[in-house]
Image (cartoon, grey):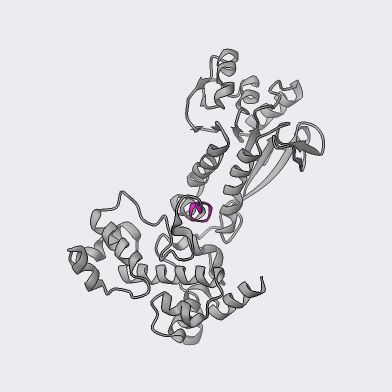
Amino acid sequence: MGDKLRQAPRSFDSRMRHSNQAYLQGQAPHDEHPPICRRIGFVLLEHFSMMAFTGAVDAIVTANLISRKPLYRFETYSLEGATVRSDLGINISVDGELLALDTKDLDILIICGGFRSNLEPQRPVVAKLREAARHRAILGSLWNGSYLLAHAGLLDGYTCTVHPDSRDGLQELCPQVRLLPHPFVIDRDRISSAGANSALGMMLAVIRHHHGDETVRGIEEILACDRTLDDLPDSPMPTLVDDPTFPEALQTILQLMKNNIEEPLSIEDLALRACVSRRRIDRLFQRHLNTTPSRYYLEARLTRARRLLQQTNEPITSIAIACGFSSAPHFSRCYREFFGVSPSQVSARHRRS
């Protein structure tokens, strides 16, 4: 019994839980009930914005990667034919035609437009969009896909956004639709984004509504490589765990931890340098990070080690030292306790791949 308990992987307590979720082995999900796998359909108009589409899909796929069970499944549809040409001139194969779509168990339907897309929907298309609305699917648009929803009368009384080049036309066509000059808009069961860059933000907002801030933080950490150098292998700690709304003392302590991974400071040293009491540090971590400072520090070091094992060919002993562990055996025990596999197994997989 004791051996089995020692072999069972421990869970991450802090906000780094979702950053590491995809790499944990043999653990039960944190939720008592398995997450719902929502079905999303994308309708690709001819000359649709490839960047807007892939931004939205990237959020969905990454959400599945950091979850122990799929959170979303997506399908693509055309107005007609087996392929659709994007704005880049690349033909994309689709799963089917919109008119054949079964909307009964559809959770979200998103119209993907583009700068040169034809925005005059045929009557059967309008009927299918209205059918999806009757089945209570969330209806959305990328770029100027709002045009089709407005033609179908499905944006009456809603706020939405559209690409600036299409704003005047939509306002003239459907004055009952309230257009906002925002990157993306979510109004009850209608979602819309105005361009390529905002599609990702819109989908992250949807995922946040479904699964909370921690899931979105995990997605952002993977997708935000172009925002900061902190995501590179020489970064001492994972990004996006610090919050500007945290008390100044907690931000100071997190920064001290970030700067002292290879040679970890004691909690007493952290308290001394941050000019706060040890008791206050405990309260700050419990209130804002739902863990203890020692546990958070350990999780940060193990997360750093996991990245180095996956991204470099450094010896395990070197990685252990770089992450503040006194010996390779101690590092291996801690790593296995949390991830359910040994560092050598992770390193071997990395070399094979």
Tell me the quarter of the image containing the C terminus: bottom right
322 lies left or right of 35: left
198 lies left or right of 112: left
For residue 250, above or below residue 271: above
Tell me if I can see residue 131 in this picture: yes
For residue 42, what is the image quadrant?
top right
**Residue interval drawn in magenta:** 220-225
Q: Main secondary structure of the magenta part?
A: helix
Nearer to the camera, 204 or 286: 204
247 is within the stretch colored magenta: no
17 lies left or right of 197: left
Q: Residue at x 46, y 62 (%)?
A: 17
221 is within the stretch colored magenta: yes
Q: Residue 340: image x %, image y %?
A: 53, 75
Nearer to the camera, 260 or 136: 260
Q: Residue 177: image x %, image y %?
A: 53, 19
Q: Residue at x 67, y 26 (%)?
A: 130
Tell me if I can see residue 342 in this picture: no
For residue 123, what is the image quadrant?
top right
Q: Residue at x 45, y 79 (%)?
A: 320
For residue 51, above or below residue 218: above
For residue 93, what is the image quadrant?
top right
